[in-house]
Amino acid sequence: MNTPGASKPGVSCMPVPRFGVLGSGKGSNFRALAEAFKEDSRESEVAIVLSDVEEAGILDLAGEFGIPHRFVAPGHFRTRMSPEAEEAMVRLLQEARVDFVVLAGFMRVIKEPLLKAFPGRILNIHPSLLPAFRGLEAWRQAVEAGVTEAGCTVHLVDAGVDTGRILGQSRVPVRTDDTADSLHARIQVAEHELYPRMVREFARGISIGPRDF
Ligand code: GAR
C-alpha cells in the first residue's frame, strides 16, 4: 500500500482522496475496488476496511491486499450497530484520514454517527434497480416477483433504507430458468464493473482537505 496520504511520485503533488470500506460478507465488491484502485491508484486509495463480522472474508481479503483492517463488535442490535460501535467506526475512519466511505455488502443500517461524520459522503451498492426491491436479498425478491429485468444501483446513503440519491445503475436481464442464486451471481458481475466506476467518478467530484501528515 502507499504511504497514507502521500501523493504519487512523478505524477502530481495533489494528494488523492482516501476511502474506507465497510463490509459484512465475502468481500467480492471490495476485491473489485481494491484491484481497480491498485491499478489506478493515482485516482483514489482504500485506506482501511472495517467489518461488523469477525470472520468475514472481506477482512482476510484486506489482509491479502495489505490494507489495514479491523473488526468492530456491533453490539446487541440486529439491524444496526450500537451507537458506541458506530462511533468506534467513525474514530477508526477518521484516524485513517478517509475522505469518504464505501459500503460493500455492509448489512446494517447506517445511523447518525456515520451520517454526521461523513455527510453526503457514504456510498452503497444495492443488488436491485432501486427504487425496486429495497432491503434484504433483493435478487430473491426480484425472482419471486417474476420481473424480467434486475440489476444493481450505486447510491448515496441517507437515513432511510436504500433511499439515497442514485448515482448509477446497471441492468441485468432475468432468465426464465434463473434461481435466486444464479441471478445474484450475474448481478454481482455487474456490480464489480459498476462500483469502481462510480467510486472513481465520485472521488473526482469531491474536494479534499489539505494533508498535514
Ligand atoms: C452484494 O451483492 C451487495 O450488493 C449486497 O450484498 C452483496 C455483498 O457481496 N448488498 C446489499 O444487499 C446491501 N443492501 P460481497 O460481500 O461479495 O461484496
Image (spheres, rainbow, N blue to C red):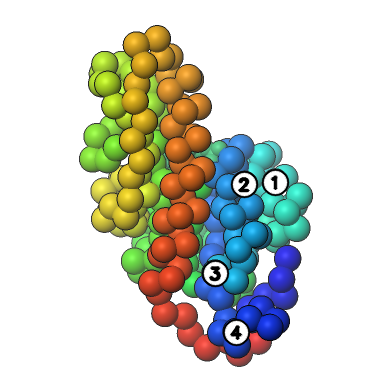
For image coordinates 45% across by 38% down, the residue present is 190
Q: Nearer the viewer, mark 1 or mark 2?
A: 2
- Residue on which the image places disc 4: 12
Q: Residue farthest to the left?
A: 131
What residue is pinned by disc 3? 43
Three-letter amino acid code at the position of disc 3: Glu
How far apart, in angstroms, are the residues tagged by discs 1 and 2? 7 Å
Q: Position of residue 147 (x, y in %)?
A: 25, 21
Categorize mark 3 by other alpha carbons within 10 Å: few (<14), some (14-19), many (20+): some
Q: Amino acid at mark 4?
A: Ser
CA gap between label 1 and label 4 equals 30 Å
Q: Quadrant of the N terminus?
A: bottom right
Q: Nearer the viewer, residue 57 or 155?
A: 155
What is the C-alpha distance between the residues marked 4 and 2? Answer: 26 Å
Comparing labels 3 and 1, the label whose residue is closer to the camera: 3
Please tell me which residue is depicted at 31% across the width and 16% down the height of the picture.
144
| Outermost residue toward the front in this view | 10
